[in-house]
Amino acid sequence: MSRAFIFPGQGAQTIGMGRDLAETYAAARAVFEEVDEALGQNLSHLIWEGDQDELTLTANAQPALMATSMAAVRALEAEGFALKDYASFVAGHSLGEYSALCAAGSLSVADTAKLLRIRGDAMQKATPKGQGAMAAILGLDFDTVADLASDAAEGDVCQAANDNDPAQVVISGHAAAVERAVELAKARGAKRAVMLPVSAPFHCALMQPAADAMAEALASVTLNAPVVPLVGNVMAGPSNDPA
């Protein structure tokens, strides 16, 4: 039997996450302290006692979710469940792929936090707050959602961005176009079509400036081979080759 450790993406953030882990396990607390130091920010205070809207900002949510994910990994390790012994694969949804790389030893916690701050800043700057949006469409296949997103664009960007499963597709783009697509999806038989709690339109053409910034940032860090293969978002297959 194969077991995978899978890490969440943006939208999973909530005030108070990881606090019980940090209070129970010294190794988990050390993760939050390392992230705070790497960023020069008391991010852990924001995570545990801050404002949800501030936490949801991309530049905060991404390192915060990684820190919480890694705190969970360290807590498991403290209980004797080392990832290399108990997992056959790691994977992560969107920013969760960075958490997966960190958990598998490809990146240090500090480097991952810094990369995610750069990533979050770049993604937020790529589209001003409020101008972009994402929505989940349930009950329609990818091709149908891609077509209705195109129909809803009307000169804006609106694209099928995440092929999550045969009946769940996430769309991304300009806010007005995504809202039009949500209504169009309902009219075309979607079981549900809901806006997502994110602060930027990820995984669409509007993010190209962020992709350029990340190419430069990633060139400055060392990526080690993971202790177990990573199943990547793009290829959807396992690899342990850093290149």
Image: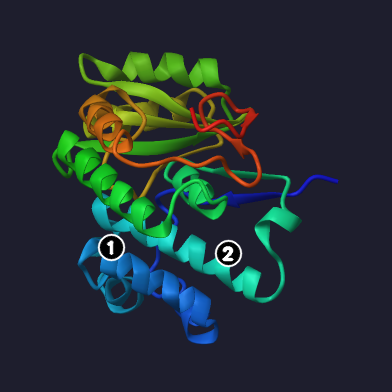
Using residue 193 as the reference point, say whether residue 35 is left or right of it: left
Q: Is residue 84 above or below residue 37?
A: above
What residue is pinned by disc 2?
73
Query: What amino acid does circle 1 point to?
Result: Ala
> Mark 1 Cα within 10 Å, few/some/many (few <14, many 20+)?
some
Give residue 211's position: percent from left, percent from top.
Answer: 28, 29
State which mark lies toward you, 2 or 1.
1
Using residue 190 as the reference point, say whether residue 107 is left or right of it: left
What residue is pinned by disc 1?
38
Residue at the bottom extreme of this rendering:
23
Give residue 38's position: percent from left, percent from top.
Answer: 28, 63
Q: Can see residue 174?
A: no
> Mark 2 Cα within 10 Å, few/some/many (few <14, many 20+)?
many
Q: How many marks?
A: 2
Give residue 19's position: percent from left, percent from top.
Answer: 44, 79
Residue appearing at x 66%, y 57% in the figure: 83
> 198 or 17: nearer the eye?
17
Query: What amino acid does circle 2 point to?
Result: Val
Residue appearing at x 40%, y 66% in the figure: 14
Element under disc 1: helix
